Amino acid sequence: AQKITQTQPGMFVQEKEAVTLDCTYDTSDPSYGLFWYKQPSSGEMIFLIYQGSYDQQNATEGRYSLNFQKARKSANLVISASQLGDSAMYFCAMREGGEYGNKLVFGAGTILRVKS
Amino acid sequence: AAGVIQSPRHLIKEKRETATLKCYPIPRHDTVYWYQQGPGQDPQFLISFYEKMQSDKGSIPDRFSAQQFSDYHSELNMSSLELGDSALYFCASSSILEDTQYFGPGTRLTVL
């Protein structure tokens, strides 16, 4: 069963505008973590933001914020003031369980293109 | 800040050859993970180690093996390489104090 769903294969956004990348997840575990990673064309995986299942507030890291709606099982990434350098593949991922050494399960990704 | 180091960055092998990928985690990180990302795909978990012991295993072929050494670096050994093993192989590390996995730059393996 698909655990992480990213329904937007590709997105366009105008430079300096905000964009929301969607992510829904499926788990029955009460303890889990949600992550967003950025993968530019060069290939590296860059950590952007993390949300724990018990966190009361939405996570923010600079221009990135995570819109966490637990009841809907969604963890959308919001990028404010888009820049040309934001053009990349974005992956949503989930870690289940409270034990250490647990793997990440990734969604299929969303390609974001920022237009000047 | 120090990041995860992977070597080599690029590797070209012939079918049926062997390959060894190395990973040096962020200092004081105790857990290492290996992921495989095929062309146009999302990363798939292979195996992880916590304090030098295997902690989790994913869809890792029997032809692959891995271990974590006393200095916490890890090696992924791949034998009888097949064309389908061509992929980007990531190592990631994390600390018991933090949930986040930090990825290395990856090793791009091409099997001809």
Image (cartoon, helix red, strand yellow):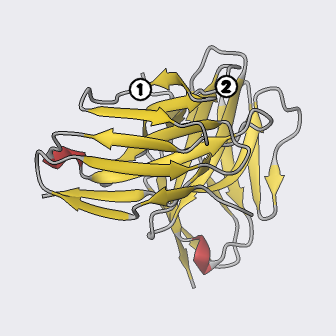
Category of crowding for the residue at label 2, using alpha-carbon neighbours closer than 10 angstroms: few (below 14), some (14–19), many (at least 20): many
Q: Position of residue B59 (x, y in %)?
A: 35, 28
Q: Residue furthest bottom?
A: A116
> Which chain is mark 1 on?
B
Asked if labels 1 and 2 share a chain, the reply is no
Q: Is residue A19 above or below residue A69?
A: below
Q: Residue furthest front?
A: B70
Residue linked to disc 1: B58
Q: Amino acid at mark 2?
A: Tyr
Q: Residue at x 72, y 38 (%)?
A: B95
Query: Residue B11: which quarter of the image?
Result: bottom left
Residue linked to disc 2: A100
Q: Position of residue A112 (x, y in %)?
A: 52, 64
Q: CA distance from mark 1 to mark 2?
A: 15 Å
The quadrant in which the N terminus of chain B is found is bottom right
Q: Amino acid at mark 1?
A: Gly
Query: Residue A32: which quarter of the image?
Result: top right
